[in-house]
Image (cartoon, grey):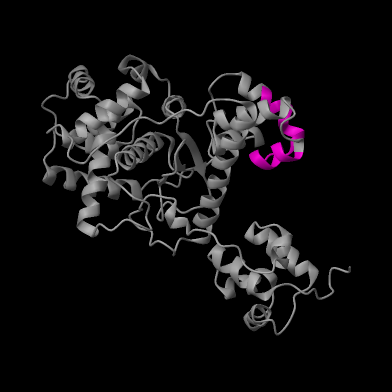
Amino acid sequence: MPSNQAIAVNPSLLAWAREESGYATDRIAKRLQVKEERVEAWEKGERQPTLRQVEELARFFHRPLSVFFMPRPPQLPPLAAEYRRLPDVEPGHESPELRLALRQMLTRRENALNLMGELGEPVPEFSLRAHLRESPAEVGQRLRLAMGVTVAAQLDWANEWEAWRAWRSAVEQMGVLVFQFTKVSLSEVRGLALLRTPMPVAAVNGKEMPEAKAFTLCHEVVHLMLAAGNEEAPAARERRRGSEWLEVERFAEVAASHALVPEDALRGVIGQLGLQWAEWGIENVRRVAKRFRLTPLATATRLRESGFMTWAQYNQWREQWQAYVETLPPRRGGFATPMEKAVSRAGRPFAQLVLEALSANRITSVDASRYLDLKFEHFDKLRVHLARGPGETSLDE
């Protein structure tokens, strides 16, 4: 069939695919370089798109071409039934970029479980629980203990990338899939948690600075702990009001800060740096942050929690820090290989699982390429990359 010939598709599927992807008709019209009225006519069944246009829609929506020929739209649960409540995201009104990222991560998790079943591997259990009646500091200490990262190792990390690799690996060992997602604005979401079990997901926005990723990751793991303790529900079922929800966010923030910086370690570093009686300006906070490989903002939060700053001092410091950050030039990303990008997105455990299934002839090369979003020609280099040990690129995607 010529690509410019009109093709009979199910108009209700055109509308469904667009709405499920979070796009308005004007965005589709711009993408296909047609008038918005034309898109509306397609969805009403008054006109038909060409084969080339349908193929472009399939690519844009990240859907198989066959979906537009189904007799009726599939019945899918809302995405907000999967992820924890997010501070600046209204359930059902996620951006197209976030909706795509959520779909991809949900699919990756399902693929991981299916591959483990095919290989006969046991599915690890995420066993940590937390309750809001507990002290967030105690929850943070419990998380730190479960991650198994010693203070000595933390203070010995050479840079923020080594720190991020270590924290990510520690969380993955607890039965959590750690994913990174790209193309989603930091202003919309920095991190999220998918509350399905077994093998829940903690995901971090790839646009985060490397020294910020550890805090975001631990923050999401605390939410997983609260969900496991029946203290949280997915966004679609969460009924807390704004102020009540802010208390939950605050709990996760404090617990994450204690997981990353134990009290004794904090006071020890402050003593080593001679800052016991210091004024906590930007430079002194940065000195402490550098030792723990965290952002100054996360470090200031931790200092506030241990009484080194009052709330008034912290708020004043935060205003100064924000003003300082606005004077800095934009941070540039570097070059990452396709293999590094694949591992960065999906994590080492998932990448290794795909390679094992491929070697055992449980999946085809086409399946493996699709699971990792990586051309098969790169798989030999991927094996070499994974054999080097738990590392990943030191560059942003």
Does the stretch in magenta take in 19?
Answer: no
Q: Residue 320 at x, y = what percent?
A: 23, 47
The span shown in magenta is 366-383
Q: Is residue 25 above or below residue 65?
A: below
Q: What residue is drawn where x is 18% and y is 22%?
A: 267
Residue 162 picture location, percent across and down: 45, 24
**Quarter of the figure with residue 66:** bottom right
Q: Main secondary structure of the magenta part?
A: helix
- Of 332 and 92, nearer the camera is 92
Decide if residue 207 is in sight here: yes
- How many numbered marks, from 0 up? 0
The location of residue 100, given as percent across then percent down, is 55, 54
Q: Residue furthest right?
A: 1
Q: Nearer the viewer, residue 313 or 173?
A: 173
Magenta span contains residue 374: yes
Q: Quadrant of the C terminus?
A: top right
Percent x, y of residue 186: 42, 51
Relative to 224, 348 lies left or right: right
Q: From this viewpoint, which residue is outermost toward the top? A: 152
- In the image, 353: left or right of 368? left
Q: Is residue 371 above or below residue 157?
A: below
